[in-house]
Image: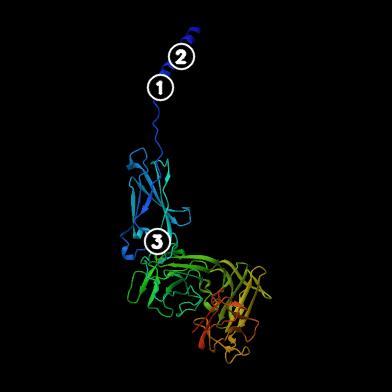
Amino acid sequence: MKNILKTFLIMLGAVSIFIACNKVDDLPFYPSGSAPVLSSDVATVAPMPADSSNTVLTLSWSNPKYALDSSTVKYVVQIDSSGKNFSNPYTREVTGSLSTSFVAKDLNAVLLDFGFDFGVSYSIDIRVVSSYPNNNDQQFSNTITIQATPYIVPPKVMPPTAHTLYIVGDATAGGWNNPVPVPAQQFTMLDSVTYEGTFYLAGGRQYLLLPVNGSWDEKYAVKDNTIPNLSAGGDFGYYSSTNQTEFNSNFPAPPATGMYTIHVDFQHGAFTVTPVKTFALLYVPGDYQNWDPASAPQLASVNSDGKYEGYVYFPSNSKFKFTSQPNWDGTNYGDGGAGQISTSGDNLSISGPAYYKINVNTNDNTWSATPTTWGLIGSFAGSGWSNDVDMTFDSNSNTWTGTITIADGDEFKFRANHDWGLNYGDSGADGSLEEGGDNIKGIAAGTHTVTLYLSNAGYYTYKIQ
């Protein structure tokens, strides 16, 4: 056993001596490169749309002299807004070459991604980072600054020539009536190709966009309103009586009733619909409309807190119920007696014809119905904040209308039953009515027809013509 161990140790020592005698050559040493020097062929870039495919900027830089084939050297061009210290730059990778060029449309896209406005000159910083292909030994060039002006790219969809945009449809507070209520159904122009507005939309219904209020000659629509999830956004296009394109379907509203912000981008021909607040609803089916919950008037709980409100016209003495769904499969409320509702109660009843303001509280199971007639009251001639100008109800459109003559500086409100117990004004001058809200003012002098819309549960508005 000793001899075997002795022999093994002798062999191991011999191998060690052999390895020690075979010295490995020194690894090659590559010196560091030098920072490239960057230059531009222009100090100012301000192309026009006609230059889209033309070269408008060429960047060149010196060789950093890395110790390898120069055709494999990596260069990263960085462009950023001046003063941003290249915190979030646009980058372009170049291999081997000591220059790169930009055509106008590519540079323009970079500038627009920075959020630059059309036709405005901005300072941009440019530098080049060189390295070995594996990113080792990065060398940063000098930074140069040039002036660049983005140009307007012809939009995918031509925006309104009058710089106005409106929404119309049975999903809106004003229905398909055209002209629409303003400002309640008018967009705000953010820039020449972008519009935005926050609107009431009735769930599951439809709408169109109009460049001219009061005209059906031109409209913006979608190609196919059965596309899944299109109610949240997608592509749209232009349609007119003389240019009948494939974009001829109404926009689909989201499934839930509420307030939505609609963003319309003509540059890319796209729109988005973002919920601001959705409403909980009760439906009011009855014998006056063939007991059909899906087509019944609605009450809305704007804060989804169990407190519902809405207006319903009953053409005669009627029986009805409240349902939590547009069918009979949810919670159904009948008469619990003494101003109460009950899920096991008989039909509720009301006297008609009358236009009722109905309130329901499902927290304490109470309800009330107040018959209303509406009038206009204000500082205008014939009223003097003392006398109402009575409005007329149209059962076909579910609207109230009245005519008043306004002088400069006159103000007015809507009042129910010749009494201040229930009145609406417009706080914020945004077209939406609030109970007890501010006086409506700023109307041009003259005789006007005023329309009051109360049939959209949770959102009331008006139109002045």
Rounded to the nearest angstrom, the CA distance separating label 3 from label 1 is 60 Å
- Residue 458 location (% of width, % of height): 57, 73
> Could you say whether the residue bearing mark 3 is in a helix, strand or loop?
strand
Residue on which disc 3 sits: 148
Residue on which disc 1 sits: 23
Q: Amino acid at mark 3?
A: Ala
- Residue 419 location (% of width, % of height): 64, 85
Mark 2 or 1: in front is 1
Q: Residue furthest right?
A: 338
Determine which of the numbered discs, if any, sits on residue 13 in the image.
2
The quadrant in which residue 374 appears is: bottom right
Q: Amino acid at mark 1?
A: Lys
Going from the N terminus, do you reach mark 2 or mark 1 first?
2
Determine which of the numbered discs, if any, sits on residue 99 in the image.
none
Up-down: is 64 above or below 257? above
Q: Is residue 345 visible?
A: no
The quadrant in which residue 408 appears is: bottom right
- Residue 224 location (% of width, % of height): 39, 66
Q: Amino acid at mark 2?
A: Gly
* Number of numbered markers: 3
Rounded to the nearest angstrom, the CA distance separating label 2 from label 3 is 74 Å
> Could you say whether the residue bearing mark 2 is in a helix, strand or loop?
helix
The type of colouring in the image is rainbow
**What residue do we see at 48% from left, 55% from top?**
84
**What residue do we see at 56% from left, 80% from top?**
313
Q: Nearer the viewer, residue 286 or 360?
A: 360
- Residue 36 location (% of width, % of height): 39, 46
Q: Is residue 273 visible?
A: yes
The quadrant in which residue 456 appears is: bottom right
**What residue do we see at 45% from left, 80% from top?**
179
Q: Badge 1: few (under 14), some or many (20 or more) residues near its Cα, within 10 Å?
A: few
